[in-house]
């Protein structure tokens, strides 16, 4: 019975502590594409980012430009330029949670809010 317990316990111990490797520095700059649903319709959005600026082409007719402040290697804060309404002046916290090849998964939330959304983005050549 003890052997059975060891066979179950040790693999669980090693897999429970597994943390996926992240190469966040590979995704600090570049052009990326992600998909999201808006009003029941699938939309492809594009992000163009350098070390201090991000342009989000969620609506191709009106891109959003935001300043970036990197908190650490995998997290940054976005603050919109030219925000007109109070809701647009709120900053967003972005966190890269996993990287794999030319794709990364990230989560974002408004600063001070608990509601988190997750997406995956893929680097595209431009």
Image: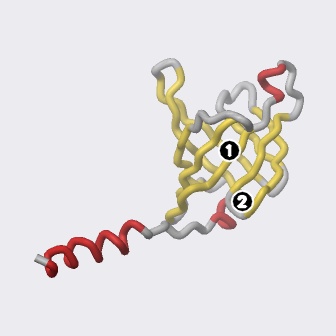
Is 80 on the left-hand or right-hand side of 24? right
Name the residue located 15 percent from the left edge and 79 percent from the top edge.
2
Please name which of the two marks, 2 or 1, marks the residue nearer to the observer: 2
Depth check, front residue: 58 or 84: 84
Given residues 40 and 95, the one toward you in this image is 95
Residue annotated with mark 1 = 47
Residue 110 placement: quadrant: top right
Q: Quadrant of residue 25?
A: bottom right
Residue positioned 72% across, 47% down in the render: 48
Q: Quadrant of the N terminus?
A: bottom left
Report the side of 119 relative to 60 (left or right). left
- Cα separation, mark 2 vs mark 1, equals 11 Å
**Which residue has dot 2 on it?**
28
* Residue at far left of view: 1
Residue 55 vertical position relative to residue 37 in the rendered view, above or below: below
Mark 2 and mark 1 in contact? Answer it, CB < 8 Å. no
Residue 46 spot, x, y in % from top left: 64, 41
SS for dot 2: loop
Q: Residue at x 75, y 51 (%)?
A: 76
The x and y percentages for residue 107 are 59, 45
| Residue 108 on image: x %, y % | 63, 42
How far across and how far down the image is residue 85, in percent?
83, 18
Question: Is 35 or 89 nearer to us in this picture?
Answer: 89
């Amino acid at each position: 019975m003890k052997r059975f317990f060891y066979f179950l316990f040790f693999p669980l111990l090693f897999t429970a502590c597994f943390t996926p490797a992240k190469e966040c520095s590979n995704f600090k700059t570049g052009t990326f594409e992600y998909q999201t649903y808006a009003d029941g319709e699938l939309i492809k959005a594009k992000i163009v980012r350098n070390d201090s600026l991000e342009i989000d082409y969620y609506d191709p007719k009106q891109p959003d430009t935001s300043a970036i402040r990197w908190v650490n290697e995998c997290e940054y804060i976005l603050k919109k330029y030219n925000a007109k309404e109070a809701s647009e002046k709120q900053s967003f916290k972005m966190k890269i949670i996993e990287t794999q090849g030319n794709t990364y998964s990230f989560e974002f939330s408004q600063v001070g809010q608990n509601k988190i959304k997750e997406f995956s983005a893929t680097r595209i050549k431009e």
